[in-house]
Structure formats: C-alpha cells, structure tokens
Amino acid sequence: LIYGVAGDGFYVTMEAGARAKAEELGVDFIADGPAQFQATLQVPILDAIIAQQPDAICIAATDRIALIEPMRRAYDAGIHMISVDTFIGDTAGDYTTPELDWMLSYIGSNNVDGGEIGCSAIVDAMGGSGKFYIQTTQPGVSTVEQRVEGCEKAIAATNGAVELIGMDYNDDNSATAAEQTSAVLASNADLGGIFGTNLFSARGAAQAVANAGLTGAVKVAAFDAPEDAIVALNDGIVDIVIAQHPYEMGQVCIEYAMAAINGEPEKIEKRYPTGYTIITRDNVDTEEAQQSIYKSQ
Ligand code: T6T
C-alpha cells in the first residue's frame, strides 16, 4: 500500500484495514508513503516498491497526471495495479477506457456526491442564501477536485442566492488553511458558510472560525472524520462531518489484490464506491457514527 501522506488519520485507518485483511488472508503486506502529500515525494517511494517486485500495489496517487507514467511502469513490471482513494487520468476514475484499462480497479468514495452532500447541508444551515468559501488542498488531486465540483453543484442549485466568494489552496496543511480562512473572515464579516474539502482543510477552517469568535455564525462542513472534527462538531464549530470509509477501502484493496494474484478477475469491479457516514449533532453519539471516526495511530 502506498498512501498519500504519512500521519493522516484517513490513511492510518486505511492501512489498518489493509493490514487486518492481509493478516486474515496470509498476505505479505507493507505500507509506505511520503511525508508530504506531493507527487515528487511519492514517485521515488513507488519506484523503490517496484524494485522490490511485489505482486500487487494499492496506491492513493497524489496527482492525477504526474502518477500515470510511474504507475504504468509498475504495471509494465508485471505488478497488478489498484487505485485506492484517488484515481489517475482525466476520465473521472473510469478505468474501462483504453488509456487506463491496465488499472484493475478504483476503490474509493463518490467524491462529487460527498461534496454536494456537505455543501447542501451548509446551504440549508445558512437559510439558503449568503456568502460561501472553500478551503482545499492542491490542484490535480482527484478527490478534492471532485468534492469542489459537488459543492459547486449545491451552490449552483441556489440560483445565485448563495455566492461562492473564493477558494484557497492550503497544500494539505492545516496551519495554512487556518491563516487563509482567517484572512477571508477578516475581509468578509458576513461570510455564511465554509467547506473544508479534506481533513487538513476542514481542521484549519474550523480553527479559524473558532479563533474569530464566529462559532455558529459561520457554518462549516468538514470532509473527513478525525477525532478533532467530532470535537468541533460537538462544540458547534462544525455542522456536518462527512466520514469516508477508509478501513473498508484498505480491506477491499487487499481482497482485490489477492483476486488478481489468484486469477479471479470476476471478483474485481473496475469501480468500487465505498460509502459515507454523515455525522451531525443529531447522530454523533450513535454507534455507527462513533465507529466511523478515523484512527489516529
Ligand atoms: O480526504 C482524504 C483523502 O480522501 C484525500 O484524497 C486526501 O486527504 C485525505 O487523506 C484527508 O486528509
């Protein structure tokens, strides 16, 4: 498993799911990933793994385009290739196209839907009108790009009643996200809603709202469910937490890898969408919500 960045609860949870399934199936499993969410750091890790000649690789590509060639190298070296979380290419994760049909599968959330769910909830919480702002990580990352697309759909559905006043790229860094959000709050006293497209974006956005004393006045949708997002939800800083199912992504990835190795392609779907658990203050204490909180180690 080559994940997107070390120390991110989302990937920590994915690795736990993959490791548990690997133990169950007797798979020799290793996981590695870059210290920052960056293609230039991830590609050398991929190359080092290719050199070890594994039978299969599950990878969360940190860039839709930059990882195509390096991943193709792995395939050409005889390794079964599976995308987990993010996809490569510009066909929205469709791996049936001739350019990408060497990819076995894309296992991950429906991110357009996720963005739309989060932003529709915030639009509602804003009473259907007002100013909206998006915190996201980097261009070229399939997941967050699709979440922005879904969010823009929710905003467009208001026919202009909600106005998207801006979007900033925080480079997957919550301190940067907090700084950028603070600046936007300072110059837009009437901001109504914010969408943080991933764990670090949402963490920074929530911190900035709390620091500005705007808890409750500015509604926040947090993509991803680390423990601190749940604390922020309970404190009224965040209004909706969209929990992905990274543990399942890790498990399915190992199952698919084994199916490929055992010559059972009928067990592999080209697209395996994992679902969401939508957490609000109404259901946060349910077992389902509590179980969907990401592991931190
Ligand atoms: O949101 C997840 C993941 O889906 C995305 O591709 C990158 O950011 C996270 O890992 C959360 O930090």
Image: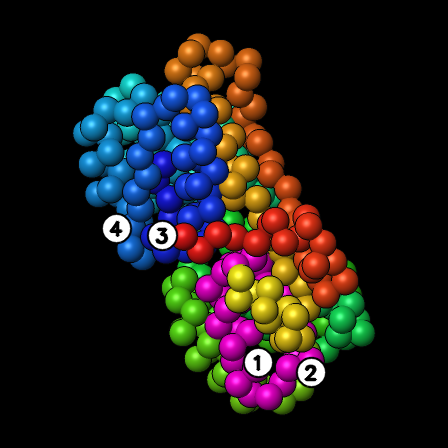
Question: Which quadrant would the N terminus be assigned to in this image?
Answer: top left
Which is closer to the viewer, label 4 or label 1?
A: 1
Q: Which residue is mark 1?
A: 209
Residue 93 percent across, percent down from the top left: 52, 37
Classify mark 3 as within 8 Å of ligand 1 or not, answering yes or no: yes
- The residue most toward the top is 263
Q: Amino acid at mark 3?
A: Val
In the visual, does 54 lie left or right of 8?
Answer: left
Does residue 191 show up?
no
Quick one: 123 or 23, which is closer to the camera?
23
Q: CA distance from mark 3 to mark 2?
A: 33 Å
Earlier along the polypeptide chain: callout 4 or callout 3?
3
Earlier along the polypeptide chain: callout 4 or callout 1?
4
Looking at the image, residue 182 lies above or below residue 277:
below
Q: Which residue is mark 3?
A: 5
Q: CA distance from mark 4 to mark 3?
A: 10 Å
Q: Which residue is mark 4?
A: 41
Q: Amino acid at mark 1?
A: Val
Q: Amino acid at mark 4?
A: Leu
Residue at (42% x, 11% y) in the render: 262
Q: Is residue 218 magenta?
A: yes
| Label placed on residue 217 | 2
Residue at (40% x, 73% y) in the render: 176
Earlier along the polypeptide chain: callout 3 or callout 2?
3
Magenta segment range?
Answer: 197-226
Q: Amino acid at mark 2?
A: Ala
Q: CA distance from mark 2 to mark 4?
A: 39 Å
